[in-house]
Every structure is written in C-alpha cells, then in structure tokens.
Image: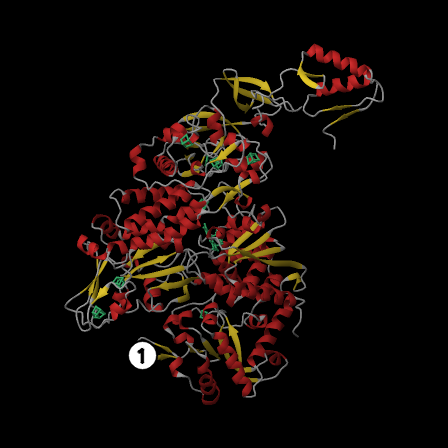
Amino acid sequence: MLQRINSPSEMVEMRDFCKAAFARQKVRFLVCAGTGCIAGGSMEVYEELKRHIAERGEDVDVELLFEGKDSEAGASISGCHGFCQMGPLVRVEPKSTFYTKVKVKDVPDIITTTLDEDSVVERLLFKNPDGSHAVAEHDVPFYNRQTRIVLAGCGTIDPEDIRNYFAVDGYTALAQIFADHSPEEVIDIVTQSGLRGRGGGGFPAGRKWKAGYDAKATPKYVVCNGDEGDPGAFMDRSVLEGNPQAVLEGMTIAAYSIGARYGVIYVRAEYPLAVVRLQKAIAQAKEFGVLGENIMGTGFDFDIDIFQGAGAFVCGESTALTLSIEGKRGMPRVAPRPRTTEVGLYDKPTLLNNVKTFAYVPDIIRKSADWFKAIGTESSSGTAVFALTGHIKNSGLIEVPMGIKLREIIFDIGGGIPKGGKFKAVQTGGPSGGCLPESLLDTPIDYDSLDEAGSIMGSGGMVIMNERTCMVDVARYFLQFTEEESCGQCVPCRLGTKQLLEILNDICRGRGKKEDLDLLVELSHSVHGGSVCGLGQTAANPVLTTLRYFKAEYEAHIYDKCCPAGVCKELISFVIDEEKCKGCMLCAKNCPVDAISGEKKQVHTIDQSLCIQCGVCFDKCPNKFSAVECVSPKIPVTPKEKMEVS
Amino acid sequence: MSEVTITIDGLEIKAREGTTVLQAAQENGLYIPNLCNHPDLDPAGLCRVCVVKMDDWKIAISCKLPVKDGMVISTEDPEVQQIRKNTVELLVANHPMTCLTCERDSTCELQKVAHYVGIKPDDIKRYRRSVRSIPMDTSNPFFDMDHSKCILCGICVRTCDELQNINAINYAQRGVASLISTLGNKPIAESRCESCGECVVRCPVAALSPKNTMEPMRQVKSICTYCGVGCGVMLGVRGDQIVSVEGDYDNPVNQGSLCVKGRYGYKFINHPERLKTPLVRKNGELVEATWDEALDQIEAKFSKHKGEKFAALASARITNEDNYLIQKFTRAVMGTNNIDHCARL
Ligand SMILES: Cc1cc2nc3c(=O)[nH]c(=O)nc-3n(C[C@H](O)[C@H](O)[C@H](O)COP(=O)(O)O)c2cc1C
Ligand code: SF4
Ligand code: SF4
Ligand code: SF4
Ligand code: SF4
Ligand code: SF4
Ligand code: SF4
Ligand code: FES
Ligand code: FES
C-alpha cells in the first residue's frame, strides 16, 4: 500500500490507510523539534521517551503500525508549536496534554502518569495567571483564542514523515483538482476565497495566479518566498520546518493552475533545519508520486528546487529575489517594469508567493472558498500569523482570525505586560511597520486598518513595548536595520535612511536640534516618495509613526535633553536614594566599573564620573528597597569629580 | 515612427513614440534635472532626481517613463519639488565641496542639478554631513577613481556592460557602504578593465577623471593615427601642445567611442624622443635624413631584391587605402605575391 500514487483516487485510499495506521497507536508523545525547543534540549527528551517506551516492551518503530500492528505508545517529533518560550514542549495525543519546559529527568513521570495512571504531571502543565493549570493545549490562554489553519500542522504532525501529512488529508486537495477542476476553476476558488499574499503587501493571490495563467511565454516558474528577513520573525521558518508538505502541495496546485513545470523555494541559509526538512519532504513527495514526474499518474510534471539565499533583507523583494536565484546581485528592478508574472525568473513568467500564501491553498481547496472567506473580515479573509515578541508574558508564534483587535492579541493571548509593566506601544510589520500607541489598541488586525493607522500588516512581526521603552530609540533601532539592509542603488534610500539614522542618533545623544523634527518629517516623505522599492518606501514608517504618536518624547530629548523612558544613556544618570538604600552592597558588587562606593549597611553612592549607565545597579537593587533611580536629564558631572578621577 | 503629444508644465510638445518623457523633454530643449541617465545607455532610474508627477497623481521618474499621447507631466508639482530637493540635498550633504579644484568644475552634472534645484548653504547645514573616506584608486595609468565623489549613478557600470561588454566593474557592498568596485575589489589596473575610458567620459561627476589632462584652448577635429578603423577624434590644443583627446561624436565611424590608445595614447605627439624625420644608417649609425634621401635609398636597395626573394608585411594600423597600395606595390613593382598582414591569426 505504501507506494507511488498512480491516480487521484488512490490518494484517498492512501489517506485512509495512513490514518488507520496512526490510529493503531493509542498514545503518542509529540516532542517539539522546532529550532527553539531543540536548542532547549528537546531531542534528548525525545530519545529518552523512546528509550523508556522501548523498555516497556512497546515497539517504537512507526513502520510496524503500517504493517498492521497495534501499539500502546510511541513518540514522534513535531514542528514548532509557537510557544517556544515554554519549551521544550511535549504534547500527548489523543488528549493533547500539554507539557512545558520538559527535561530529560521528567520523562519517567510523564510515561507513568500517562500510561499507567491516566493522570498528568501537574508540575509540567501550563500555569494560568490565577494559579490553576491548563491540561490540554487548547486550554492554554495562549492557544484558546487562536484559529490555526496554516499553523495547524505545526506541532501536531511529524514534518519528516509524509505519511503524517497524508493522514491529515494532505495532498487530497491536489488529487481533488486533478480529478475535478480545470486550472481556471482553481484560480476562481483562490480568487473567491479572498486570500491575500502573506508576504506583506497583501496582493490578492487569485489575481496574481490569473496573471500567471494569462502569461503567454514559457517555461513558467513558481517561486516560494521564504527569505523572511524581518528581524525577530520566524513565521515562515516554522511553517517550512513544521509542515513543509503543505507548502509543496500549495506550490504544486499553483503550478497546475498557471501551467508551470518548475518551482524554486528560496530559503535563507540561516534556516538549516528548514532546508533539511524541505529536502526530505521533496524526496518523500517524489517517492510517493505527488511531486516530480507524472504526478499521481496524471501526466502532470512539476519539480521543486531549493535555493539558499545569503540572507539579505532586500532579497525578499520579489524582483531582487529572482535576480538572486539567477546568481546576480539582489537589487530590486526599477519601475516601471513588467510584473513578475510576465517577466520574472530568467525573464520568464513567474508566480511568486510567500510561504504562508502557498500553505493556505490546500485547505482552501479542500474546505471551499466560502469557508476561508467566512474567517476574518470582508477585505482581509482568513487568519494572520504573528511572531509576538518584546515585553509580553507569552511570546511566540500565533495565528488569529483577521479582524481581531490588537488588544485581544496583547492581553488575552499574550497575557499582557510582564512584571507589572505598563503597555506603551506595539510595532507591527517589522522594519517597514509603525508603532501604535495605547489609544489604537482597538484597531482591528487587517491590511487596511493597520495601513490607516500608519503601520502595516507586514509579514507578521509584532513587538510589544512597555513604558520603559524609548520611542526615539525604537525608531533608531529600525532605521539602523533598514540603513544597513538598503541595497544602495537608489539615492533616497541609500542616503536618506542614513541621514534619518544620524539625526535619530543625535537626538538620542542629546545633540538634537530644533529643526530636526521638521527635517525628519520632510525627509521621511521624500524617502517614501522617491525610493525604488518597498524597503526605501516604507523605511521611514517607524519614524513617522513615533513622531505622530509620541512627539512629546522627541521634544523632551531635543529641548530638555531628557529621555523620559530612561533609556538613552547619554541623557540619563543613576542615583541612589539615601532614604531607601539599606547598604546591602548588591549594587556595588555588580557594578562593572566600580563606580559605587559605600560600607555595609551604609548608604551607597554612585560616582557619576565613572558610571557608564549600564543599569546593572538599577536591576540588582532588591525590589523591596528600589533605592536606585534612573533620572533624566543627566546629572552634570562636576569638574571637581572629574579632577578626582584623573 | 509615429508622434504623440504630451504636456510638460503646461507646454504641449511633440514626442516620438517609444521615447521617454526625459528624452522627449530634452529633444524639445526642456531641462529636467537628471544624473543617472545617459543617452547612450538604457535608463536605470536610480538617482531619482528626474522625478515628475504624471497626470496629476502619480509620482514617476521621467527617464524611465514612456511617453503616451495626452500625458500630462508636471516637473514643478510641490511633492515633486520636495522629493527632488531632498534627494539632491542628500547627495550634496554627502559630497566633498571641492568644486574649485575639481576636474569637472563647470561641466559637472551634480553642480548643474544642485544649481537648478537651488540648494542654499542653510539647506545643507540642516544635514549631518559625511563624505566617504575610501582611498582613491590611482592604479590605472590613465584615470583615477575617487569614491568620495561617486554618486553611484551606475553609468560607468552600464557603460562597461552595455557598450563595451567588458563588465570590469559593478556595485559591491550595500547601503551607504555601496561602491563601484572590480571583482574582488582589486585595484582597477589589476582587473579586466581595458582602460578604454568610456566610463570616464560618461561619469557625470569627477569620480572617474582622466589623469594629466588640461582644459583645451581649442579643439581640432582629426582622425586617430593608431589603426585602420579611423576613429574621429577631437584633439584639445593649447599653444602647440595636445592636452586632451575626445571621441568625435559626429564621426560615423566611432560615434564618440575610442579605445585606450586613441583616447590616452597621445603623449607621443609632443614627446621629445618622437621621430620627426626618416633615419638613414650611415657608417653604422642612424642619422636624420630627408624623405627624398630615404626614398632614394629604398629604391636603390629594393631594386636589387625583386621577385620571390621579397616579401611585404602590412599593418593593421594603416588604412585600407594604404594596405591596398602596399599589396599593389608588392605585386606590381616587386613582382611577387609574398604579401601578408600583421593582423592575421
Ligand atoms: C524589502 C522587502 C523585503 C521583503 N521581504 C519579504 C520576505 O522576506 N518574504 C516575503 O514573502 N515577502 C517579502 N517581501 C514582499 C515580496 O516582494 C512579495 O511581494 C511577496 O513575497 C509576494 O508574495 P505574496 O503575494 O504571497 O505576499 C518583501 C518586500 C520588500 C520590498
Ligand atoms: S529603496 Fe533601498 S533597497 Fe530598494 S532599491 Fe532603493 S536602495 Fe535598494
Ligand atoms: S549604572 Fe552601571 S556603571 Fe553606573 S553605577 Fe550602576 S552599575 Fe555602575
Ligand atoms: S542595592 Fe540598593 S539597597 Fe543595596 S546598597 Fe545598592 S542601592 Fe542600597
Ligand atoms: S564632482 Fe562636481 S560637485 Fe563634486 S567637487 Fe567636482 S565639480 Fe564639485
Ligand atoms: S575603462 Fe573601459 S573597460 Fe575599464 S571600466 Fe571603464 S568602460 Fe570598463
Ligand atoms: S564613478 Fe561616476 S559614473 Fe560611476 S557610479 Fe560613480 S558617479 Fe556614476
Ligand atoms: S520550537 Fe518548540 S514551540 Fe517553538
Ligand atoms: S535620471 Fe532618472 S532616475 Fe536618474
């Protein structure tokens, strides 16, 4: 039965066969083998689980399931569940018991509670803010507001075994279109679903596919954009690592729709695990005849290559990406230019979509366009995937229906700001996005609302910032990124981002001039209007939004030489409150430059001429004393103190 | 070719179909600031100073914008002015202000654009000035590369690619660190550059500038003496010295192009050791002689060697007509078919 699929109808048999085989395993321990959990030691946990199960006399070899044998328990790996901060994660099926921070030494307890006692290891469960425990994954607040479509397979199937994908209806969408749909019909379904590109721009996928179909020249190519250059983003990586077959199936459906024979997946070389999993996935898909020559016996050929990019952010831009595949310097083509669907890779019609865009397609085909359209909002259907990071309790990868409010993501799913902190701003869209303040927390997440607020959906970065974040510093951080990543070919971006960065640097250092605010706005608009590609056109968004929503903070830096958030080192001083200091000496012991003096149980003092504003004393002073304060503007260093130093 | 009508700043002009807005403007004597455009090259659209507004809504760059009948273009729309001004200001703020001692003073495109846009000292004062400090590449015997003046218009890169098919230079690095570089960032003399200087003449600023040339007092139309192609040259003359050479754009043979010899190999003309008369060997020594003397000797000696003993080797550096005469002389006068040519492979 486990052999090449020779007709679309055999696909359904294959699915049922795989489903039945996996059903013979009563209990399955799914160990997260995403990049985060592996770094936390999940593979050791996996080996230990397998060892214990084997010791109990259970055979852990999956092959036996396919030979019709039953199994009490087995272990497999899965892709990233998105909650890496709580990793290594183990999920126990069929109850989807959700264990966090699992260590090798926890394995015996997990085994015995599950297999002998039908209970759970309470200490490994997720602890809710109210002290209660969440047993199943969907009970965890981080998950229970999510709608997982493109991430559904991530964390629930073994990404290195195509039969797992078959068992969850994998490749039945492809079989279905071979059996029932012409290319035009497939494109119609994609169009009707309202699917918009998940690479950031939100271009309607159906329209792009139609253009690919209409293009006359041959050969045509299908390219998957897995460059994912935004700092802190790992949505596409997780999909490629956690459910690579969904991407391959989506690309093959696209190839069928536009009439392409070749596909390329562009993955950054910093994603070695994704590359390995894709290689395995491609090999297995070919073995089963769902990729390669004569797919499912239909006579349709489609082959996929992996291209490893060197990791330039700008190579994520579609025209730079195709040039980069051709071995040329990755510089965006200058408009007016033909669309990539007309002139793309090797100057041939090319359908280029983001990893997630492709990964949605099999579900849409299987479940209908209306199903997808019913999720999300009128103009933005389906779900959005975000990498939630920053000052947030539950960080990680989430998938939510479009239209959900920022507030719900941050406070319900994210659990709010940790350590009693206060929310200050949320940044979406990576370096091209903007920072939105508390007053806009009820903005619904969709392409158009975010655009209106001055930010963008982007490809899914979401950084939460607490009140100890300086917004000028944040703008500076993002500008530093774009300035470094600019390809350098056009003047407004190459020199404009640099200029904006220099001005922001000066403001952060207390050297801002009053004309700078106007110049920032003026330049931002010109860099936006004058730049060749999206990188330059959006580079100023962090500046414009922070200026729009947090202008007072800029003014404080410029006029009062004050950083209200206490971040910009050149504008702050640390002082010890005589009333509060108990002389515990913790600060003095930890100061890297020995700037703090004081005897035990005596009030300590900071020598401002030595202090480098590292903030260690602030963090080290016990909470119950909180004697170290951060003040801004800076306390002037008196000449006397300076003399003492020399 | 059919004509279309477009309007630029309220002025109706005729344009050839297939041209760009910038070309159409130029052909009608209208100036739109531009830096990275060159009539000999495909437009690149990188400097962004040729920005215009199309049909009242769309910001576009005129050097890449094809003309369309009825198109309405504004070069003075406030948004256009702002983008253009900021872009030029950025270039100036990152440029050394050494115009008075610069090779391109008064012929510099950046100067022209800055002047047109109307950049004032106070405008630049607002900026954080920074000038690149990459060392000059002086390795090429004929021209220098001064990265601090380079505006990265890419004209040199496109020239070397599109016109010369040599591809000796390209962009390297990214962001503000971007620079024009040879493969492996080797000195240009060690690259595959053939020193044709085509990039140098097209560089809009003095980033690429010829060594040892001077502004001529007058130009004299002439033909390059090096080879049979017969490229037209404009010799720049001061007093009795040749101080520069330019390709003659009106000459149908080379249309302005020259090779390294024609463009830079003119120093022999005023060289003290240059041969000015024929030399005849007398008593084992070469001494200056008149042409009559020399020709008499040749006639005397050649007469003794007529027939198969004789062979002539002609040169690629002389014209077709000269080559014809040599073979005629060899066959008809010397009576042999032993005639060959140095350019044979
Ligand atoms: C500077 C820049 C970087 C980009 N990086 C990415 C990226 O990492 N991944 C991606 O899918 N799209 C990226 N894009 C968007 C792509 O150009 C393209 O629009 C997208 O991949 C198309 O796929 P979609 O229609 O499925 O969104 C980037 C665009 C720009 C301008
Ligand atoms: S906007 Fe920036 S990244 Fe894009 S082409 Fe211009 S210089 Fe390159
Ligand atoms: S801020 Fe850092 S350097 Fe300054 S006193 Fe505290 S610990 Fe020492
Ligand atoms: S850590 Fe706090 S309480 Fe302890 S000596 Fe330092 S300032 Fe005083
Ligand atoms: S290149 Fe032009 S702008 Fe630059 S110094 Fe020379 S003349 Fe002045
Ligand atoms: S001198 Fe000629 S060969 Fe050398 S870089 Fe310039 S155009 Fe290319
Ligand atoms: S060297 Fe001259 S032609 Fe080449 S990019 Fe720089 S400014 Fe342009
Ligand atoms: S890597 Fe395990 S949850 Fe992300
Ligand atoms: S001349 Fe048009 S962009 Fe440079």
Say above or below: A612 vs B307.
below
Q: Specify the amino acid type for callout 1.
A: Gly
Q: Quadrant of the C terminus of chain B?
A: top right
Q: Is residue A460 left or right of residue B291?
A: left
- Left or right, B67 with respect to A502, comes to right
Outermost residue on the top side: it is: B292
Residue A593 image position (x, y, % from top left)? 28, 62
In the picture, which quadrant includes the N terminus of chain B? top right
The vertical placement of A103 against A307, above or below, is below
Instruction: Decide which of A287, B107 is in the foreground and name it.
Output: B107
Element under label 1?
loop
Residue B250, can we see it? no
Q: Nearer the viewer, residue B163 or A171?
A: B163
Quadrant in which residue A294 is drawn: bottom right
Q: Is residue A303 above or below residue B214?
A: below
> What residue is shown with label 1?
A131
| Picture coordinates of residue A572, whole percent (x, y) | 24, 57
Give the answer, above or below, for where A123 lies relative to A598: below
Q: Residue furthest left?
A: A579
Going by the picture, which residue comes out furthest to the right? B308
Q: Chain of mark 1?
A: A
